[in-house]
Amino acid sequence: MRLKALGERAVVARIRQRWPGAGRGIVLGIGDDAALVRGPKNLLVTTDLLIEDVDFRRALHPPRLLGRKALAVNLSDIAAMGGRPLHSVLGLAVPGTTELAWVEAFLDGFRKAARRSGVELVGGDISASGQVMIAVTVTGEAASAVTRSGARPGDALFVSGTLGDAAEGRKLLEARHKPGERGEAGRLLKAFLDPSPRLALGAALAKRKIASAMIDLSDGLSVDLAHICEESGVGAEIDLGRLPLSSALRRLSDEPLSQALYGGEDFELLFAVRPGNTRRALALGKRFQLTMIGRFTRDRRIVAVGPNSKKRPLETRGYEHFR
Amino acid sequence: MRLKALGERAVVARIRQRWPGAGRGIVLGIGDDAALVRGPKNLLVTTDLLIEDVDFRRALHPPRLLGRKALAVNLSDIAAMGGRPLHSVLGLAVPGTTELAWVEAFLDGFRKAARRSGVELVGGDISASGQVMIAVTVTGEAASAVTRSGARPGDALFVSGTLGDAAEGRKLLEARHKPGERGEAGRLLKAFLDPSPRLALGAALAKRKIASAMIDLSDGLSVDLAHICEESGVGAEIDLGRLPLSSALRRLSDEPLSQALYGGEDFELLFAVRPGNTRRALALGKRFQLTMIGRFTRDRRIVAVGPNSKKRPLETRGYEHFR
């Protein structure tokens, strides 16, 4: 059945059934003018948009995974602060011709991702539109938040996971690879379609005071590194030979290094570590895949060190929405 | 200059200049992965979407007023809880062909409305889209929140302001009346283009414990009354002769009563008052325009009492987004 046959209120009723709104300090969940919850002393708030044909293609992105991703991109921001997510609200605009089944699969994905990370949906808004637009806001708490501005010259530069997989996955998807695919292509597709926010890592780095600055990789390594450098008033030197590239990326991409540097949406964590803490950071590498890829410098340029120790300025281009 | 020539980061930089992010318990404002603020114990969270060609027409809605309205519709939800607004995040998706001047006028409107109501913008996201989409989330605090579920049989039913003006204003606007117009048409246009959230009234009703249930009128009197009745497990009887209609609506509308009952977006407050509190509510009428329009009943139907005391069931139809 299509939404325009069902009507807005019936859709809202279905959402409400899914989230009875208990736990997590919820006093009032979905169904009043605003949600009422017990607020943490150190409240994090972050919001992200996912827009059809800009951030995803409806025909290529299974709605269940899109629902997970809509939450995951926000959880990644909470992770980058070293925080714990608490509540979310969901704004969803879809064409009236959309099948209810699509919306239900989207909501199921969102709910499962929420459950897994301990997040409750407490409110939202639904509307009609010509293209699907998803606006999620997530709140969280951070006993000791890690900002973008704490890096100092001499700090080591770490990154989690592997880089460039999501950008290559997006490329493969648009070149007619299919979401359910297995093997190496499947791993790249999954990185784009269904990213995992690094909540446990972010929280561990914050709690143990290992990260002096942190950001999640949404715009691409070069741009996100530039954000940290700008906010911290430092530069950085990265060693191209150390960038963690997956074997899938190396094998399937024409331009693995370029995807690792400039491809966005890895949703890994990039963080700074004081020299005295690098051993503790490396020890965390037993639980999390961590790589030291460079260091922060007094010289405010951002340079890449290539083979033969040649240095060149790193272009800080990234994904541009307004094209 | 158009956004696609300027680029996303330049737009974000301009937004950040406008909101240096001080006060209101802000630890970190715009510019990190998430905002960090001091959270109130009783935290309200609400979100609303405004979608081009569904909620507004870009050619007819001055961007400055649209910016005010994008915040106002959320503040109205905080008002309906009897709360005080604190922080906001803004998701804005616009076509790359949009002129920077449009975005700046929108932001100026948003900022002025925020200042007036003591709200700080602490974060957001910007993206490209085919049609303008605005997603605002507002947080607030409520020492004693007023819900939709507290009405009891016998409670009086009050409404603030006048009803139906916004719906008629929307109609006039689409019939080629112009935003800047004066006189009676101008008042109706303003009700649609630039609604005023009833924050002071909502807070006064909550603080003095005068309202036993409350909702803001966004979907229209009949639908929003049905929401209160459903959540409270009661019915209601409204006296059509008492509905507060502006002289502008009476004079310019072909169907003033229908606009008052079914027209949405008045953003006035509809609330229940225990019999013992009606005098205190009426006393508040010196500061706010309040009208007693009916009462809540044990019989769960919602009926309208017309001339000659004839009762008829009230149709609870309202604006349907998915058409």
Image: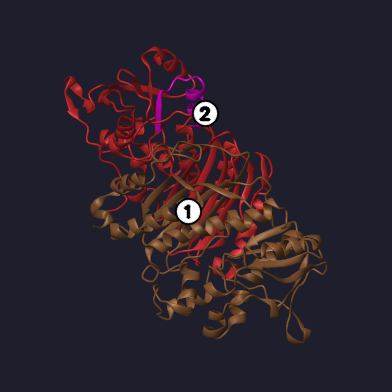
Chain colours: A brown, B red
Q: On the image, numbered disc 1 is attached to which residue?
A: A116
Q: Is label 2 in a helix, a strand or a loop? A: helix
Residue in the foreground of this view, choosing between A232 and A200: A200
* Image location (x, y in percent) of residue B323: 27, 53
Residue at the image position 56 percent from the left and 45 percent from the top: B88
Chain identifier of the residue bearing label 2 in the image? B
Asked if labels 2 and 1 share a chain, the reply is no
Q: Give above or below for B108 relative to A180.
A: above
Q: Amino acid at mark 2?
A: Ala
Q: Give above or below for A191 relative to A100.
A: below
Q: CA distance from mark 2 to mark 1?
A: 40 Å
Q: Is residue B72 visible in this depiction of the protein?
A: yes
Viewed as shown, does residue B252 lie left or right of B126?
A: left
Residue at the image position 33 percent from the left and 21 percent from the top: B152
* Image location (x, y in percent) of residue B268: 41, 33
Q: Which residues are magenta?
A: B199-215
Q: On the image, numbered disc 2 is attached to which residue?
A: B200
Residue at the image position 56 percent from the left and 61 percent from the top: B100
Q: Is label 1 in a helix, a strand or a loop? A: helix
